[in-house]
Image (cartoon, coloured by chain):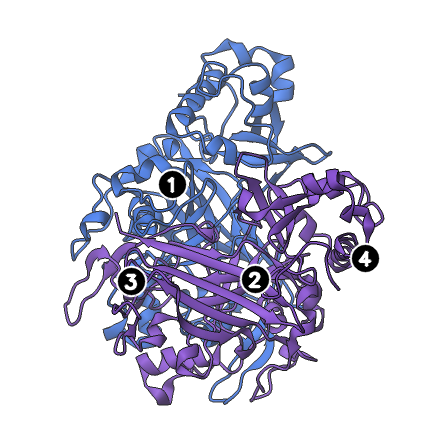
Chain colours: A blue, B purple
Amino acid sequence: MKSFIDVKPDSHFPIQNLPYGVFKLKIGSEPAIGVALGDYIVDLTVLEKKGFFEKTNLGNERVFNRSSLNNFMSKGRQTWRQVRTVLQTALSDENPLLRYDEDLKKIALVPMEDANMCLPVEIGDYSDFYSSKEHATNVGSMFRGKENALMPNWLHLPVAYHGRASSIVISGTEIKRPSGQVKLGNSDSPVFGPTKLLDFELEMGFLIGPGNSIGKPIPVDKAYDHIFGIVLVNDWSARDIQTWEYQPLGPFLAKNFATSISPWVVTMEALEPFRVTGPEQEPEPLQYLKSKGDQAYDIKLEVSLTTQNQKKPFVISKSNFKYLYWNICQQLAHHTINGCNLRTGDLLASGTISGPAKDSYGSMLELTWRGENPIKLPSGEERKFLHDGDTLTISGYCRGDGYRVGFGEVSGKILPAN
Amino acid sequence: MKSFIDVKPDSHFPIQNLPYGVFKLKIGSEPAIGVALGDYIVDLTVLEKKGFFEKTNLGNERVFNRSSLNNFMSKGRQTWRQVRTVLQTALSDENPLLRYDEDLKKIALVPMEDANMCLPVEIGDYSDFYSSKEHATNVGSMFRGKENALMPNWLHLPVAYHGRASSIVISGTEIKRPSGQVKLGNSDSPVFGPTKLLDFELEMGFLIGPGNSIGKPIPVDKAYDHIFGIVLVNDWSARDIQTWEYQPLGPFLAKNFATSISPWVVTMEALEPFRVTGPEQEPEPLQYLKSKGDQAYDIKLEVSLTTQNQKKPFVISKSNFKYLYWNICQQLAHHTINGCNLRTGDLLASGTISGPAKDSYGSMLELTWRGENPIKLPSGEERKFLHDGDTLTISGYCRGDGYRVGFGEVSGKILPAN
């Protein structure tokens, strides 16, 4: 499959992908929903007006002239597939309808450089899992020793906690270094000040399409029907604040100052060719967590850093979404097994995705092993944790045959504390 | 001050109170905002149409014909006070305007029995504190022994965690017993089933008026300006699920199946006469947590239980909001000190409010001391935790001179698991 739009082989956005996002024109415009294609945004409000989606379940309903994807996401998989088929057909190099309609192309194809991306989804609740065995083991080893690295519950359930929805920001938003209470060394009392141990967490998150009613769990074999797509997530963390505050109720201010997500939501349809078998699960999960088939996805992830002196992005980690022990269907089934209701637009993130190798860890905490082994940059600088002025970027893609299905990136620059 | 509407001395809703809520007529109607007065709801959409609020900051804006209080809550204290003055004047027995306008009274005064109450606020994020020293000490003693009851951080900061907003329900909503993983005794593996240790938590929560921008903390001496009012909260908890899941990231499925709140939001203006000095804080809090003046409130709280055989509500606990160690201004200042943004409608709950006496504890866990001392009901039944069919009700009020400023109640009946 090929589009009449020229798409470079290493582009994240070929016709096989078509991720959804919300954009505004830099010259000023209402927010609108589009899909990414090469270096263009296909403005779906234009196609919608022209009746392109009339034969889908959408009929004449306008769902794309909105400031979030929520309405479209609530429609369900059948509609998503119909719209995808319409788009792939219309954008194909074999279809003359749009290809040779210069007037329509002029308004429907927006160069990416002319637009700013907005938060694509209105996120009601944000839950963050802890589903990488390597990450949980690394962190556990540091704080409790290798013997007791994994908590007794870890292999039996996908551990998770509630995050903060209000402070989820779009890629590119600058992140102010948070201040808070930390306890230094053997001092009896805490002191107040900017975090000294500012970290990133390499994560991905999936977004809920149709939700469930309170009291009605979603079985693991129906979970997929409720998942619209996936984004990159950076769960910024202040490790010194976290260490002092997190007992006994979990992380709070160490995390809720900001969480960044990528602007393009890659659909499960686009990810379908990249399903792979996940890690073996031993002990066998309880019945409600038993998922069938290949529920992992081969998504190559990369973390890079630029600093005041290191202008060229320096790759500090390469990981993969497929390393996750608990898959997204298991996460969703677990989240609702007690009757908890998910709503359209809710974000369920993976937790830090660390791989088995030392250069595949998903946080500074692990990469530098609590600062013991600083990262050396080509500029000559060293990093134990993030400095003011640093920019941390996560990117990810799946490798197809001659094309990539990519997520673009999620990026954030650190600003000094107040 | 007295209203021309007859209000019984033990009513929670005299003219001194005027709490806000959202209601629908049982015969069918759009949701509307009203204030409670005696056994009536004053329909503010009617007064608004008649121009009662024209001379307030609201001018001609319609804010009461809505399904939530959020818009009105975003206006700020000056507007809230103006509207309160207008209402107290209009409803006073000294004012003939409404008192003798039978036609207007007929449409503006809705008997409470003719209406159903709705969730009053659209809650974006829900945070739950852990601010009762007695509660934290009780729970800590049970699980870690008396010597280590309080975590080292507890006296230095108001510990909190993120709760689930989607499953916050209005008083009267029935609560289905949740199922989940629990680990029994010395077994190696967990089993799946309905919780056997279903509990309530006696809490109150305050609701955010104007919020703050991300990166801009709200200082403790400005915190009050951001607080609209207070409701009763029951943070239902499944203790066996909690024990197994909560390490290391805090409670999740043990809590997020449901949280109930009372329908009437009592404003800070109505609570003003009931300010009292809070507990002494030793060690002295860090500068950003130092609050001045009387920041506690004398709100009498009562928990009662009815069962299949115990039809008459049996009081199982009497506590008071004033026992809380950390006050609401400190909670708010702490929540934002890292730059976390609060939005209009956010709910910040207190955590379980236990008092010093054994009959003032705010959960079954504490009242029965993990089930060791079951509660004996007059019906002859015993309770360690909640049974199917039980109804748990929390009520609360402040005692004025010849009147009460009350919160009504938050109530929920337990339904069997699926």
Q: Secondary structure at mark 3?
A: helix
Disc 3 versus disc 2: nearer the observer:
2
Q: Which mark is residue B94?
A: 4
Relative side of A300 to B292, left or right: left
Q: Which residue is mark 1?
A: A212
Pick whichever of labels 3 and 2 is earlier in the sequence: 3
Kind of residue sitting beneath label 3: Ile
Disc 3 versus disc 4: nearer the observer:
4
Disc 4 versus disc 1: nearer the observer:
4
Q: Which residue is mark 3?
A: B241
Decide which of A416, B72 is in the foreground and name it. B72
Mark 2 and mark 4 in contact (Cβ < 8 Å)? no
Kind of residue sitting beneath label 1: Asn
The answer to which image quadrant residue A380 occupies is: bottom right
Pick whichever of labels 3 and 4 is earlier in the sequence: 4
- Disc 2 from disc 1: Cα separation: 31 Å
x%, y% of residue A208? 42, 41
The answer to which image quadrant residue B404 occupies is: bottom right
For mark 1, name the chain: A
Residue B218 visible to an observer of this rendering: no
Disc 2 versus disc 1: nearer the observer:
2
User: Outermost residue, left direction?
Assistant: B187
Q: Which residue is mark 2?
A: B407
A391 above or below B217? above
- Disc 3 from disc 2: Cα separation: 31 Å
